Amino acid sequence: MKKISYILIIAALLSAFTGCGAKQKMEEKIAEKVIEQAVGNADIDIDGEEVTIETEEGNFTLGSTEWPVSELSSKIPEFKEGKIVSVMNSEAYLLVIVEEVEGKDFMDYYEKIKGEFNKESYETKSEDTVAYMGKNEEEISIMVSYSLGDSTVSISGSMPEQD
């Protein structure tokens, strides 16, 4: 879990790297070294905006703007509306941030999630936020939230804890 925290901090730092040509390649090499030092023995692949980190504990990808492709993401209904602006994905966890989402589109997805992830569920609605958490029959957890103020959806999921 500590390594995942380091990875998330590094992801924020990587988002600051911009440029092109030789400058970008130098920044990518520096970023790779920083990540390797933070998480230990890791293989880092920086491909444009997407970064993949492979460690003994598994793979972690961030920076994509497409619905993730993994065992976990295949078990969570894809949200097809709005504009995906950020994805963090591993074998056990995922986080997708989607902007420019209409309230009706989120509520349709919300109802679908409530129907499929109805174990140990919790929902909350306030003046500017709607959120739902639950598990499905496979013990996969999901949390979806919608911020009315900026029309942003957050979808996070996790595989069941391994004993």
Image: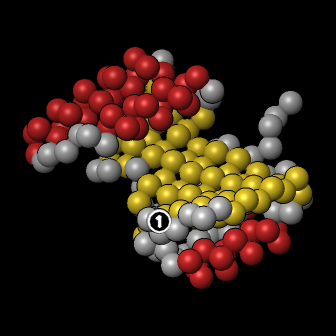
Q: Image height check: is 93 above or below 98?
A: above
The percent position of residue 14, horizontal first and vertical second, equals 32, 38
Residue ID for mark 1: 149
Instruction: Specify the farthest residue to the left.
Output: 22
Q: Image height check: is 15 above or below 131?
A: above
Q: In the figure, is residue 5 to the left or right of 29?
A: right
Residue 2 is at least partly visible in this image = yes
Name the residue located 57 percent from the left edge and 51 percent from the top edge: 95
The part of the image, by quadrant, that contains residue 68 is bottom right
Q: How many marks?
A: 1
The percent position of residue 96, horizontal first and vertical second, equals 53, 57
**Between 92 and 122, the one nearer to me in the picture:** 122
Q: In the figure, is residue 54 to the left or right of 116?
A: left
> What amino acid type should be assigned to the residue bearing mark 1?
Gly
Q: Image height check: is 50 above or below 100?
A: above
The percent position of residue 139, horizontal first and vertical second, equals 85, 51
Few, some or many residues within 10 Å of mark 1 (<14, 14–19, 20+):
few
The part of the image, by quadrant, that contains residue 122 is bottom right
Residue 67 is at least partly visible in this image = no
Name the residue located 82 percent from the left edge and 34 percent from the top edge: 162
Q: Quadrant of the C terminus?
A: top right
Name the residue located 40 percent from the left edge and 50 percent from the top edge: 63
Question: What colouring method underlies this structural image?
Answer: secondary structure
**Between 41 and 20, the one nearer to me in the picture:** 20
SS type, badge 1? loop
The part of the image, by quadrant, that contains residue 124 is bottom right
